[in-house]
Amino acid sequence: MIQVPGELSCKEMVELMNDYLEGRLSPAELSDFERHLVFCDGCAEYLRQLRQLGTAVRRLHEEDLPESTRDTLLEAFRKWKR
Amino acid sequence: MIAYKFLARGAVSPFAGVAWPPPSGATPGAWVAASPGAGPELWIHGCRPADLPYWLDAELWRVELSDPARQVRHEVQAERGRLIERVEAWGSEARRDFTLQCALRTGAVAAQALRQEDRESEAGVLSSCETLDDLAAAAEALLQTPLPDRSRQLLGYCGDAAFWGRPSHAGCVSYIAAIAAADLRGDPAAVEDERAWQARWLCGRLGILP
């Protein structure tokens, strides 16, 4: 597919999702990002899921997690760091 | 200035999720303002007629933007905006017709590629398509035959355009048509040309002065 200046690929969109949610995109990036959402249901859905995830995580407290889940997560994070 | 704005169903902005106050009869809706101190990129966005194809959504509104409005690529930005009236002509029928036209133009692009490869009969099959089903069937049948890569790519776009055309996904199909035009010419500038055609179609159908 031809590369069009100002058109973001879905891969670039995924890389920019967090910056978009945190209001860190430049004006040009912001416009390009939102125009992509007009035609790409996949990226729009991914963004919706990220927003939902952010909302859910903000509601969670450490003490809400069962101990076994907390241990599993901690183990996963420790392995990931290695 | 007077501009246009696409909103999601219920006059909700598609990105920020803000519900815009609707007008009441001839009285415009209440002003919606950007957050105090926000940069222009976070101001209220509107469209000039030429910008319409880039921002398609369920509802189209005429809006008043406060002065001075900042004109940038594909949009105008202002600190405040308010709804004046809904462009009722942009409804399911217009969206369906626009989507069909964009899909058929994708077919015309693929037909042009086939003609350039001396495949007149295959091009004729595509050029005779009048519906999304015609286009999908023609593209699928031609893809079963040996063809150069460029034509295969463009026929793939035809299939995509027919697929997304069925739910009248105007934003997606108009984008496919623009990319197909650029692929045929091998020139990204063709995107702007195709978008300009789309803007003219929309203005003509919706009674908007270009």
Image (tube, coloured by chain):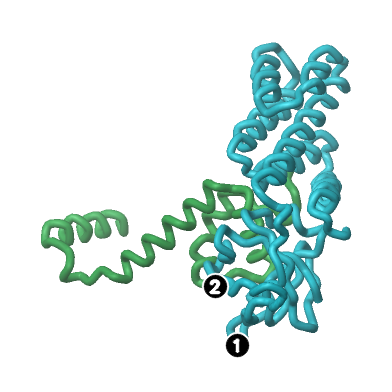
Chain colours: A green, B cyan
Does residue B189 show up?
no
Secondary element under disc 1, as helix, strand or loop, is: loop
Where in the figure is residue B50, as x and y percent of width and height? 82, 58
Q: Residue visible at 75% across and 57% down?
A: B52
- Marking on residue B36: 1
Q: Which residue is mark 2?
A: A23
Quadrant placement of the N terminus of chain A: top right
Secondary element under disc 2, as helix, strand or loop, is: loop
- Residue under mark 1: which chain is it in? B
Q: Do discs 2 and 1 belong to a common subunit? A: no
- Residue under mark 2: which chain is it in? A
Where in the figure is residue B87, as x and y percent of width and height? 72, 60
Q: Amino acid at mark 2?
A: Gly
- Above-or-below relation of B77 to B94: below
Name the one closer to the observer, B37 or A10. Answer: B37
Is A32 on the left or on the right of A46, as rendered?
A: right
